[in-house]
Amino acid sequence: MSNQSTENILNVQLETPSNDGYKFSWFDWFCLCYPPGWLIIFNRHWQHYHQDPDGWNWLEYILFLLPGGFYLALLIRWLRLGCRSPRKEVGEFDPNYQRAFREEVLAPIVKHYFQGELQQIENLPPTGPFIVAMNHAGMSFPWDFLTLAYLLSQERGWTVQPLAGVSLFEHPWMVWWLPPGWSRVLGGVRAEFDAFEAAMQQRKIVLYAPEGLRGPLKGWRRRYQLDKFDISFIQLSDRYQVPILPVICIGNENLHPWTINLRKLQRLFKLPFLPLSPLMLLLILFPSMGVWAMKTRLRYFIQPLEPVGLDTNSDKGRTAVYQQAQKFREKLQLQIDRLLNSQ
């Protein structure tokens, strides 16, 4: 079958998910309740819509569920592929697949597990483009981002594309965990200035963490203390006249509680962060739990839209932009403290 025919079949399937879409089976509900099985759900859903001869198979999925079984599954897959890594494919953003994944996988997870909810929705603008700037925490798979993207799409029908760390696209561990091109096909924008700027030029709604990796790196002890903000979102907001929508997430620190970051080991393994917590003992036995997170209630407080340019413009230079980014951070910190004190 030609690639064009395969793409046509995929598009038909995604346009009619109620008839041909992925259905949550008893096995999927079991995987949702059993943490090592979350990775199985992601890969099975991908394989429902995509030909993936290098992907995991049923024997390997069953091994995921056994203590230490992931290592045997990894060896079997490596041998099955002729002692090589899975082929890296450069996929393009597919709104149809994003919608299918959102409705068929994210919906039960967000509704039944993270209990995600939007508050102060009167502050939501009618349409984009804009930059959704959110505090980021948890030292885990970015479920606070995915949940917010899902909730905004449900509330307004928007197509939201998260700015994601480069490791989610190309780290060797991700190539084995998740299908090739998974993050990009789902709409992830590489957390690099050029990719961010291209998204602004295309007038997209981008979900962004101004703290960058400093957010998860701060760990449990400083979970509600915003770290220094990057300045790229202020620069691009001003340059392309795209307003900023601030959002405060309460509860994302519980995605992976009681963590500290081991910086030396993190650098050794070339990871964005390497958290140490009691849960890491389970991760050693069940590496497929890397996409799982603790059950928590994720609440998102929508703040009033920030006007384009704020107190700066492109003529004032990097120092003025930096100062404005930190003023924005201080403003959000005050709102976070207020929300915590009102609990």
Image (cartoon, helix red, strand yellow):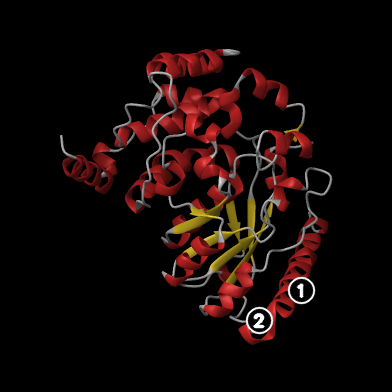
**Quarter location, residue 290:** top right
Q: Which residue is mark 1?
A: 327
> Do callouts 1 and 2 mark residues in contact (Cβ within 8 Å)?
yes
Q: Look at label 1 and name its amino acid.
A: Lys
Q: Quadrant of the C terminus?
A: bottom right
Residue 285 seen in this snapshot: yes
Q: Which residue is mark 2?
A: 310
Q: Quadrant of the N terminus?
A: top left
Q: Residue furthest bottom?
A: 315
Whether residue 320 sits left or right of residue 241 in the image: it is right
- Badge 2 crowding class, 10 Å Cα cut-off, few under 14, some 14 to 19, many 20 or more, is some
Q: Look at label 2 and name its amino acid.
A: Leu
Residue at x 64%, y 17% (from the top left corner): 285
Q: Position of residue 252 (x, y in %)?
A: 68, 46
- Badge 1 crowding class, 10 Å Cα cut-off, few under 14, some 14 to 19, many 20 or more, is some
Label 2 residue SS:
loop
Tell me, for residue 20, which label it has, or none. Answer: none
- Given residues 319 and 97, the one toward you in this image is 319
Whether residue 301 sits left or right of residue 264 in the image: it is left
Q: Position of residue 195 (x, y in %)?
A: 49, 61
**Quarter location, residue 246:** bottom right
Label 1 residue SS:
helix
Q: Position of residue 196 (x, y in %)?
A: 52, 63
> Does 229 appear above or below 67?
below
Give the Cα distance between marks 1 and 2.
10 Å
Residue at x 70%, y 58% (from the top left corner): 211
> Does 8 appear above or below 179?
below
